[in-house]
Amino acid sequence: MGSRFGGTKQLEEVTDEGDAILDFSLYDAVEAGFRKIVFVVRSEILEEARSFFESKLREKADVRFVCQDREPMAEKHSAKRQKPFGTGHALLAARSEVNESFCMINADDYYGQNAFSIINNGFRSAGEADFLMVGYPLKNTLSKFGTVSRGQCRLTGSGYLKSVIERKGILSENGVISCDEADEIAEPLTPDTIVSMNLWGFTPKIFDLLESEFRVFLKNSGEDPNAEFFVNDVVNKAVRNGKAQVKVLRTDDEWVGVTYREDKQFTAEHFRKMKEMGFYPQRLW
């Protein structure tokens, strides 16, 4: 919804050429070999999103759109809410269009130029893993202008996920990192804490897990207008119950995003420099 940003940040232009952050992710995904793209949107911005992205991707990828607020399980509840049900439900809404292994991202986050190659290569060497996640050092994912939410990860010695816990209100001040909620189970946040940025590699197996947990969520919290259904929570429970193994693929790339309106200038400068240095063409499409 872009409440902290103050608008539809997923379609906000951040370059003189009219690129949104998502344009760079789409460009990287196509370069890494992805050939199908499913956009999950709100009904009210469906046509705007089509107009913004569809023509750019023509002949480059098979493009689909689904509306989260029309997902059958939650449709009767959606009218009572001002904001969507969260990342887990957004992914569940895409189920009708996804039958193969896939990568999930947030539309307003830039994951670094190598992110999609990391996922694609990870699928080829997944071994015993059911799912994949790209993990980032927390210090590479903070905003200079306010708090952020991140999934704090605990890993096994062999790099598999032990747990991922949603942390809200993360802020770095004078070298000290804090968050809104204390949890005796979680380790303290440090600059090198590995966090999830919702860059996942999933197989269709995830949809059965999502559907089962979303039914429980609706029963317990469906009438709460502020309750959210997170992908992190579903994966966390599946790992804890032995229903899924998740291989964490680390990267030192820096996150760029527009959580706040003030982030836009920093983000615009980042992409301008990347184009000047030849990492991206002046015109992506």
Image (spheres, helix red, strand yellow):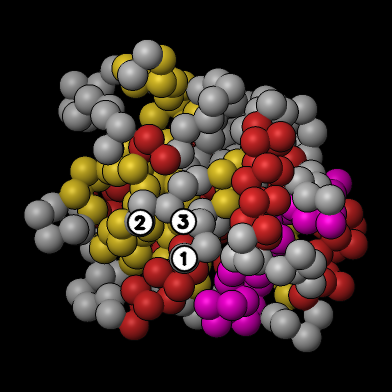
- From the viewer's perspective, is the residue at label 1 or at label 3 nearer? 1
Residues at circles 1 and 2 in contact by the CB criterion of under 8 Å? yes
Kind of residue at disc 2: Thr
On screen, residue 81 versus residue 95, left or right, reads right
Q: Name the residue that disc number 1 marks.
A: 114
Identity of the residue drawn at 77% across and 27% down: 6
Residue 48's place in the image compared with 280, above or below, is above
Q: Name the residue that disc number 3 marks.
A: 199
Kind of residue at disc 3: Leu
Position of residue 177 measured from the top left corner of the image (x, y, whole percent): 34, 21
Q: Name the residue that disc number 2 marks.
A: 251
Position of residue 255 measured from the top left corner of the image (x, y, whole percent): 50, 46
Quarter placement of the N terminus: top right
Q: Which residues are magenta?
A: 17-45
How far apart are the alpha carbons under marks 2 and 3?
A: 11 Å
Location of residue 188 (image quadrant):
top left
Observer able to see residue 239? yes
Observer able to see residue 84? no
Taking depth in this image into account, of 46 and 174 the one nearest to the observer is 174
Identity of the residue drawn at 31% across and 61% down: 249
Which mark, by number, is residue 155?
A: none
Label 1 SS: loop
